[in-house]
Image (tube, grey):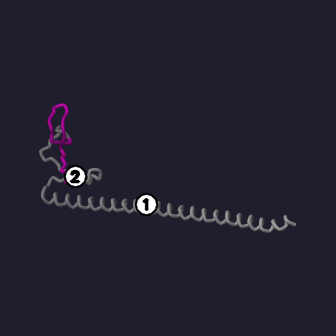
């Protein structure tokens, strides 16, 4: 008889314990899910910012190339020996190439330092950086 009186309270206590553990497990799982979602959102935000920076860099390069082309056209109006131009992304400079009108066959093709003669030699082409 004494055992019968203890069975119902013991069952209630065990059931409450099981429900408490289950509730705790659900809360832990919910918290982990929230943290995982926050990490995903943070990673997406970082990826979006990186894509935005990349797009801004591309737009900057396009602008600089356009500026370089316009500079070349301006130089062509001033000088008749402009050969071309290009934008050097690595150094962020516009290089305009000019043809040396005094160049003769046999002279160096490109301007630069000659290690053999230890002198700077004018070649067929030379560049200015802007």
The verdict on residue 110 being magenta is: yes
**Left or right position of 63 against 100:** right
Q: Position of residue 27 (x, y in %)?
A: 61, 65
In the shown orientation, is residue 35 left or right of residue 100? Answer: right
How far apart are the alpha carbons under marks 2 and 1? 35 Å
Instruction: Count how many numbered circles sit on residues in the image.
Output: 2
Residue 3, x across and y down, in percent: 84, 64
Taking depth in this image into account, of 20 and 39 the one nearest to the observer is 20
Q: Which residue is mark 2?
A: 95
**Of the pair 39 and 62, the residue shown nearer to us:** 39
Residue carrying label 1: 46
Q: Position of residue 61 (x, y in %)?
A: 30, 58
Q: SS at mark 2? A: strand
Residue 50's place in the image compared with 109, above or below, is below
**Residue 53 quadrant:** bottom left
Q: Is residue 77 left or right of residue 43?
A: left
Q: Which residues are magenta?
A: 109-130
Helix, strand or loop status at disc 1: helix
The single residue placed furthest to the top in the displayed view is 116
The furthest residue to the front: 2
């Amino acid at each position: 008889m004494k055992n019968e009186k203890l069975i119902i309270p013991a069952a209630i206590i065990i059931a409450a314990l099981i429900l408490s553990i289950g509730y705790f497990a659900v809360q832990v799982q919910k918290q982990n899910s929230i943290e995982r979602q926050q990490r995903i959102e943070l990673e997406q935000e970082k990826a979006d910012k990186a894509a935005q920076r990349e797009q801004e860099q591309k737009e900057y390069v396009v602008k600089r190339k356009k500026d370089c082309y316009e500079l070349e056209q301006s130089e062509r109006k001033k000088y008749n020996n402009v050969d071309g131009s290009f934008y050097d992304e690595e150094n962020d400079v516009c290089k305009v190439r000019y043809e040396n009108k005094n160049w003769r066959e046999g002279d160096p093709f490109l301007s630069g330092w000659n290690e053999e003669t230890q002198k700077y030699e004018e070649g067929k082409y030379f560049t200015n950086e802007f």
